[in-house]
Amino acid sequence: MGRLERLDLDQDVPEEEYDRKIERLQLEMLTMQHRLRQSDGRAVILFEGWDASGKGGAIKRLTDRIDPRGYSVHPIGPPDEVERRHHYLWRFWKRLPAAGIFAIFDRSWYGRVLVERVEKLTPKKIWRRAYGEINAFEETLANDGTPVIKFFLHVSAREQLKRFRERERNPFKRWKIGPDDWRNRKNRKKYLEAYEDMFEETHTKRCPWHLIPADSKRHARLEVLRRTVRVLGGLLPPADFEHESGEKPGK
């Protein structure tokens, strides 16, 4: 049994509890942004997962209350003509955050060992070599003081199908579903093998994977916020919330 199969997908959170907890966690995320900015730090948060697993919704809740000037979101699709002329990591290097900024990747450099592997877009010798290249890349960032927080959102085949059909019915969500999604679903077994190999090869002490059960969107969104706050809170120095007068709040 693989790591994803061991996840409990039945976890859920009542709506009232969700509303209470998400407000607190989003305020804690705002505090993390203050701490990052005041320390001139930077952080990378990346999301991988099944199609319709809720990556976009999790990113929205992660960023709802923070200053939009302090983060950038990079939705990653196929490389363009210029990017294909460079090493595959080049387009990610140029999207890394400046001091005081979060960079959030909706899909990432792991496409080399996922879609490029499953769709046979890259020879096996090359995508297998990429595990070491990716580990070295992330280790370089961590050594430079840039934490890399990696999330994988896991949904069951049944829940994914339910969300696909909902997207087809809803005119405001129809743009989210297309032939590629249905083709990827047919390759679910191949993707599951690729995911498990990815975790085995790239789950490191400095840059571990956070596997999130996501059949419940509420549970997944809270877990993403909670784990992001926990990781950053353990790495960033405390914020100085002095007023411009130099007096601390409450004095």
Image (spheres, rainbow, N blue to C red):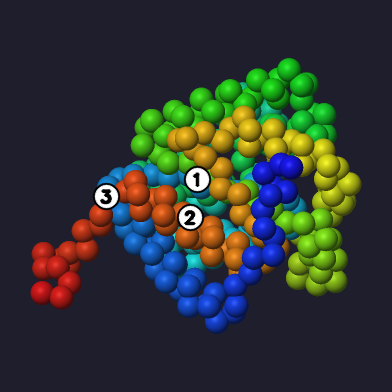
Residue 115: horizontal and vertical position, in percent? Answer: 75, 37
The residue at which mark 1 appears reads as: 149
Amino acid, disc 2: Arg
Amino acid, disc 3: Pro
SS label for mark 1: strand
Neighbour class for label 2 at 10 Å: few (<14), some, many (≥20)?
Answer: some
SS label for mark 3: loop
The residue at which mark 3 appears reads as: 237
Residue 1: horizontal and vertical position, in percent? Answer: 74, 42
Residues 149 and 196: in front is 196
The answer to whether residue 107 is left or right of residue 175 is left
Q: Which of marks 1 and 2 is nearer the N terminus?
A: 1
The answer to whether residue 172 is left or right of residue 228 is right
Exactly how many numbered labels are in the figure? 3
Q: How far apart are marks 1 and 2 (CA)?
A: 9 Å
Labelled pair 3, 1 in contact (Cβ < 8 Å): no
User: Residue 98's quadrant in the figure?
Assistant: top left
Residue at 48%, 55% (x, y): give it: 227
Neighbour class for label 1 at 10 Å: few (<14), some, many (≥20)?
Answer: many
The residue at which mark 2 appears reads as: 227
Residues 131 and 6: in front is 6
